[in-house]
Image (cartoon, rainbow, N blue to C red):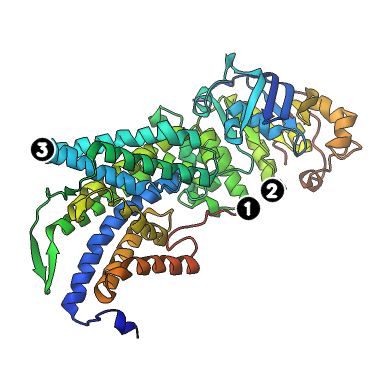
Amino acid sequence: MLLAFGNFTADPSVNLQLLIGGLALGAIYAVVALGFVLVYKSTDVLNLAHGEFLMLGAYFALTFLISENLNFFLGVFVLLLVMLVFGLLVHYGIMRRMVGQGFFAIVLITLGIATIIRALLLIFYGPTERARLDLLPQGSFEVGGATVRYVDLIIFGVVAACVLLFFIFFKYTRLGLHMRAVADDIEAAAAMGIDPDKVYAMTWAAAMVMAGVGGLLFGHVTGAIDRSIEAIGLRAFPAAVVGGLTSLGGSIVGGLVVGVIEQFANGHLGTKWREPVAFSVMFVVLLVRPTGLWGRKDLERV
Amino acid sequence: MSSDGLDLRIEDLTVVYGGVTALDSVNITVPPGGFVTVLGANGAGKTTLVRSITSLLYLHKGRVRRGSITLGGESILAKKSPDIVKAGVAQVPEGRKLFPNLTVKENLLCGAASRSDVDAIDDSLEQNLELFPQLRPLLNQTAGLLSGGEQQMVAVGRALMSDPALLICDELSLGLAPKIVHRLFELLTEINERRGTSILVIEQNASLALQHAADAYVLELGRVLIEGTADELRGNPMVQELYLGGGGEAHTSYAAIERPSRRPEAHGRRPPVSES
């Protein structure tokens, strides 16, 4: 009966192609999920504006890399710098005032931020959609009957580098240690002389920079750049939850798993099954492990 | 490399949470290099006192309505918590409040967060490990999985990592075996005597605190009810009745019961602590 929904095939090259596409999509999800996790882990805020952050990154990439026609590396630098400033703005302008408020009040504030970003993009960039970015090499090569695009490989490499960078930052730097301390217990951290305000500001800045990277990458693989690409935030949400909202590594695995599952659902069942299957995976994982695959409850022995 | 102890003066301190008064015109002084204890039951305002000194009231929607707090003659009332740690105040919070997912070493390093003399942090770490040799093999363990006693050692060590002039301990004895609590109090006395660090101990275990402190205050319902030297308080009938279990026999704590005989009364500021 299920067969009526799609065209199953055992052709290995088709499945390999779906796997490659899934991993490429999953890498994008991973970048977005990383942004969710970063903010949630450090500030306890579920940031529903992260898709909009990423959209902001994609539009700024248009401005600095296409319209202003800056040198690629200079353009990327300016893009990330501007994103960093916007991250600080989000903290010092808005989120800072919400510290200590209820969880849902803060979630609603992030929805408000999302609305503001959408409105600002409409005002400054207008309603017309733009062509996707084309700054990365466009070619492809064949492996076992499947096509691998250079763009996907680069995205994969960039995501891996970001993860490695985060890992080193959190494990080996003083600020990274202080961020983890605040995530563990904000009051104890403050009592030790760690300034939670500064840590939160850095977190929002880092999340925004990640969204800049995500927007730059996603801008290369999306159909076109318009105000609907913020939906990537919602689509990457299962990835963050499956990985466990508190685990950076989990968000990467979650992203890849959800990306691959979506591609297989897409290829074998049809496009309309992509999201239902992704969210079903999220539900099943949550039923079995409420903290996600790698999320953890705080260790505490009393 | 010890910092000399600084004096803490709390004058006319009144703290409110919303409309509820938690501290009412409280005056408490810790002399430089002194060892002071504040006793009191649950809800007496002890933890509010700690939060006021360390500027953490805002996390609990509390605020200082009146009064002053000075450290070494300088007001710390308007300072933010990181600046207060920088000024020399370290605390062992109630319930230890370690960072459960960080390792022991990382917990200790967090205690040095306010320090800018990064090179000296390793020395402080080494000093701590000499003070708590049990922690050395546990450095890379996740703190949340340690025993209560080990956790409390990490909490004290973490506070000492900022090389404080004033060390505040909030309910050090809570939920710990008497032997460990005794050892911790002995260490506090050692730190107080050897490094000259001023110490403020907030305690429910009155008999133990009075054995080690020089001066004491009894806090009740947000007010200072009794104050004096530790000896005076031990001899005070009301303190004996309410906090020492009556009759002058300090049997409110298991710690006191476990010991075969009471310590000889001290002639100086502090009783000797090495004979047990």
In this orientation, which residue lies closer to the viewer: B120 or A213? A213
Marked residue chain, label 3? A
How many residues crowd around disc 1 within 10 Å: few (fewer than 14), some, or many (20 or more)?
few
Amino acid at the residue labelled 1: Val
In this orientation, which residue lies closer to the viewer: B139 or A141? A141
* Res A2 label: none
- The residue positioned 41% from the left and 55% from the top of the image is A247
Amino acid at the residue labelled 3: Asn
In this orientation, which residue lies closer to the viewer: B199 or B2? B199
State how many labels appear: 3
| Residue on which disc 1 sits | A302
Marked residue chain, label 2? B
Callout in the foreground (2, 3):
3
Image quarter of residue A115: top left
* Res B175 label: 2
Q: Earlier in the sequence, mark 1 or mark 3?
A: 3
| Residue on which disc 3 sits | A71
Marked residue chain, label 1? A
Separation of disc 2 and disc 3 at Cα?
63 Å
In this orientation, which residue lies closer to the viewer: A228 or B186? A228
> Where is residue A157 shown, x and y percent of the image?
20, 54
